[in-house]
Amino acid sequence: MSLSNNNEKMSIGRFISETVASPTRIPFVVVIAVILIFQLMNPTFLSYQGLVTLVYSMSYFLIAACGLTFVVMMGSFDFSSISVMKFSALLCVLYIDDFGLWIIPITLLCCAIIGFVSGFLVAKLGVPSFMATLGISIVVDGISLLMSKGFLHLMEHEGFRSISTTFIAGIPSVFHWSIAIWVLCAVLAATTPFGRRTYAIGGNARAAVLSGINLDSQRIQVFMLSGLLAGAAGVFYMSQLGGGSVEIGGQMMIPLFASVVAGGTSLRGGTGGPQNTLLGVIIITWIQSGLRMMGTGMETQMVILGLIAIGMSIATTDRNKFRRVIVK
C-alpha cells in the first residue's frame, strides 16, 4: 500500500514537472495568467482600444528582443541594444528631411556597423561581451547626445509615420512588421546553419570550435544582427511615436532582458530562441501596459519587472543540465 502511494506521488510529481514546470510551457501559463488577472482588474484591458495599446507597446520591442535573443543564445550579452535603438530613432528624426525614406537603409547600415564593432571587440580582442557592449553603449549615447543637443525633436514626415501607424485589418501596421521579422528570426534560428552554429556556441564553445565552426566570424555576425534589429526597432519606434530625445528608452534595458529570459532563453546560452521570445515580450510589455492602465508609478513597475525577470529565470532554467554537469 505504501509502495503504491509512493508510486502515485511520484507519478503526480512527474506529471507536474513535465506539464507545468517545463521551461517551454511556463511562458504559456504566465501569458494566460497575465491576461486573466489584468482583465479581471480592468475590464477595458482586452477592449479594442486596449488591444491597440498593447500592440503598440510590444511591436518595436519585439524586434529589438529578437536581436538580443541571438546574442543570449550564444552565451553573450549585448548592453548596447537600447543605445543603438535610441541612436537609430534620432538619426531618422534628425535627417529624414535631408534623405527622405533613404534614411532607413542608411540608419540600418550604421547600426549594423555598431554591431560589427561590438562583435570585433568580443571575438578578435577578447573583451568580455558585457564590458564591450557597455562601453559601446556609452559611446553611442554620447554621439546621440551630440546629435540631439539634448532637445526633443518632432517628425512631420507622413510617409515615414505611415510605416507604423497605418491600420491593416484593424491592427497597426507596426504589428504586422514586427511579426514578419519575428517569423524570419524564428526560421533563421531553427532551420539554418546560422542558427545551429549560434546554439552550438552557446551550448559549448570549445566543442563548437572542434566541430569546425569559425567562432570569431559567427560572433561578429550575431552582434551585427543584434545591432541591425535594434536599429530596426528604433526606426519603428520613431515612426510610431513621431518624436523623441536622447532620453528615450532609458528604462527599457531591464524589460528587454526580462522579455528574453521570460521567453525561456537561458542566459547561459544554448537554449531558447526567438520563437520563444514572442511570449516573453507579451508577458513583459502587457504587464507594463496593464500596470500603466492602472496608474502604477514607473518605480513600482521597474521593481515588479525586476522580480519577474528573476522569477522567470529561475523557473525556466533547466536544472537537469546542471545536475548532469555536476555528476560528470
Image (cartoon, rainbow, N blue to C red):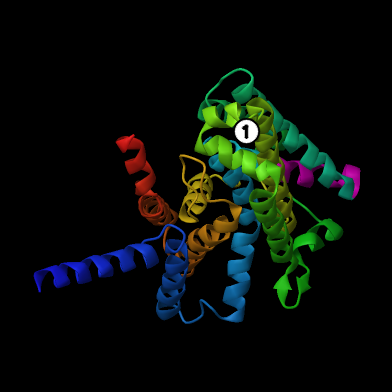
State the SS at label 1.
helix
Q: Which residue is mark 1?
A: 141
Against 70, residue 32 (above or below) is: below
Please tell me whether residue 88 belongs to the stretch shown in magenta: yes
Residue 116: x %, y % from top left: 70, 30
- Determine the residue positioned at 47% across, 82% down: 43
Q: Tell me if residue 221 comes above or below residue 4 in the rendering.
A: above
Where residue 56 appears, x then y in whole percent? 64, 64
Magenta region, main secondary structure: helix
Q: Quarter of the image for the C terminus: give it.
A: top left
Residue 64 lies, with reference to residue 211, above or below; the image says below
| Labels in figure, total | 1
Visible in this render: residue 271? yes
Label 1 is placed on what type of residue? Answer: Asp
Say which of 282 and 320 sits in front: 320
- Taking the image as shown, residue 215 lies to the left or right of residue 20, namely right
- Front in this rendered view, residue 179 or 210: 210
**Image quarter hosting the N terminus:** bottom left
Residue for point 67% across, 28% down:
214
Range covered by the magenta-colored residues: 86-100
In x, y percent, where is residue 211? 61, 31
Q: Position of residue 185 (x, y in %)?
A: 68, 52
Magenta-span inclusion, residue 13: no
